[in-house]
Image: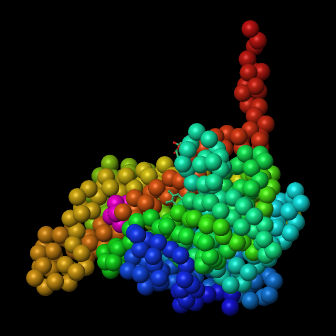
Amino acid sequence: MAVRTGQDFLEGLRDGRDLWLEGEKVTDVTTHPKLTGAAHGMAGWYDYVLEHADECIIEDPVDGGPMNAAHMLPRSAADLDVRHRALERMARYHVGMMGRSPDYVNVSFAGFAALAHLWALDGNEAGAANLVEFQREVARRDLSLTHVIVHPTIDKSVPDTEAGGGEVALHKVADTENGIIVRGARVLATLAPFADEITVYPGQPIPKGADAYALAFSIPMNTPGLKFICRDSYSSSMPAVDRPFSSRFDEQDAFVVFDDVEVPSHRVFLDGSSHVYNMVMARGWVANIMQQTSIRAMVKFQFAYEMLNRMVTVLNGANPTTNQLLGEVWTYHQLVKSAVRAAEADSRDWGEGAWLCDDAPFVALRPTVPGWMVRTNEIIRQLGSHNLLAVASSGEMADPELRPYIDRYLTGAGDHDATERMRVFRTAWDFAGTGLAGRTELYERFYLASAPRMYQVAHFTAQRDHEWKLFDEFQEQIAPF
Ligand SMILES: Cc1cc2nc3c(=O)[nH]c(=O)nc-3n(C[C@H](O)[C@H](O)[C@H](O)COP(=O)(O)OP(=O)(O)OC[C@H]3O[C@@H](n4cnc5c(N)ncnc54)[C@H](O)[C@@H]3O)c2cc1C
């Protein structure tokens, strides 16, 4: 089995994982009232991939079977084109509202496997081989993965690895006959209820010598000692027409506790090299993963632009101000699309045949797009105003007593009827106003690290990759004084 159906996916989630939601231990994430909607929404994603097999499924270069293109190790510009088409199609299912559909971590691991020689440095050949073997398994079994790369924040005045006496951040405490024991916590496993395995890999750099914290591995979600504490649910039990996103795409985020968890040796990718830990994310990760994230953002801006256009036309509200605001959102869409094209056009071999995008356009997008996402939501709320709330539900539309009032008083301009008005403004509110919308906005702000940090990285990258001469050249034209 190399490409799973939605039903296969759901069956994999019934594994006795130790997962908590709003004070309750969840016994089955596929049937729990606050998780079932997203479990089935995710299952729908797997089925959608199969429905669009011509775009999303490729031939596995190892065994010749069908494989989701997100597992591809790109070896050429043509491979990146194929992956682009697949990632764009996969994002269209949730119109960019799910940050962590399985293609995200799967693309990340495909990049790690393609650049395995970096993981093999500092005597970590066995860890790198485990990683390559794991990535093959993920592709073969078409797994859904969550990931945790960030340490909990409890005291910002010291490095995360030192806060709480060094006991809070995830670290190794012992070797065993079969592997290693790890203890501590990490944030914030998006998709945890809907993942088959949890992966741990590097995030922000750790202090040199903090080797006990230099870990990377993957383990099944039901591994003994693993505890997942989910944030409050923002899912809705209303029909999809009322809550198109909250009813299906509350992907969840969970705080993760590792209470002396044994990681088997064959699943350890890194154990004890702060040098490798601090290096692997700085070489090629952005070039690889941001093809996925930027294509998702591009789809989301396109959807937002089209939705805004419908909001304006339903109420016949076109005027210079609305045109300006719509133009602004279209601009964000075009800028992201252009940056992806530029990154793909300048793709190159990043070592050992790993063919990845140019990272410079992505380094520029990384701190900038979060602001555009927040601004787009603001525009949706600004243009939508009370219409986002003065909107009937499908239950009210179906009520014979209420329906005549709705058709008369809650309709749109001209030929735009009450049903259209309802669909447009309910979609807009769930995109930019509901609890899930607020959480998704926070996700957009932080999922690739905070913007202030990333502007600093942008400056360092610019200094690393380019010799800046224009200022001096210009000065040379001017006579000395
Ligand atoms: C909805 C959501 C889902 C997430 N999912 C995951 C996940 O699946 N896996 C995972 O590993 N992590 C996940 N995260 C965590 C995410 O990776 C972190 O939030 C992110 O890396 C930012 O780190 P931080 O929250 O510690 O914020 P910080 O980096 O501390 O930033 C917070 C603020 O502090 C200021 N600041 C911090 N550092 C600097 C600096 N150097 N210079 C200037 N200002 C600074 C800025 O104002 C910044 O906005 C998720 C977060 C959210 C909100």
Q: Is residue 468 visible?
A: yes
Give the image quarter of residue 240: bottom left
Looking at the image, residue 105 sits to the left or right of residue 315; the answer is right
Residue 75 is inside the magenta segment: no
**Which image quarter is the C terminus in?**
top right
Give the image quarter of residue 447: bottom right
Give the image quarter of residue 474: top right
State the residue at coordinates (74%, 38%). 463
Up-down relation of residue 192 to residue 294 (above or below): below
In-front residue for pair 312/400 = 400
Residue 459: image location, x then y, percent: 67, 39
State the residue at coordinates (16%, 76%). 407
State the residue at coordinates (73%, 21%). 475
**Which image quarter is the N terminus in?**
bottom right
Extreme residue in the top direction: 481
In-front residue for pair 265/178 = 178
Looking at the image, residue 151 sits to the left or right of residue 406; the answer is right
- For the stretch drawn in magenta, the main secondary structure is helix
| Protein image colouring | rainbow
Up-down relation of residue 59 to residue 317 (above or below): below
**How many numbered tags mark residues here?**
0
Q: Is residue 349 visible?
A: no
In-front residue for pair 7/412 = 7
Q: In this picture, which residue range is highlighted in magenta?
A: 428-434
Residue 318: image location, x then y, percent: 30, 56
Residue 160: image location, x then y, percent: 62, 48
Residue 385: image location, x then y, percent: 26, 56
State the residue at coordinates (71%, 40%). 460
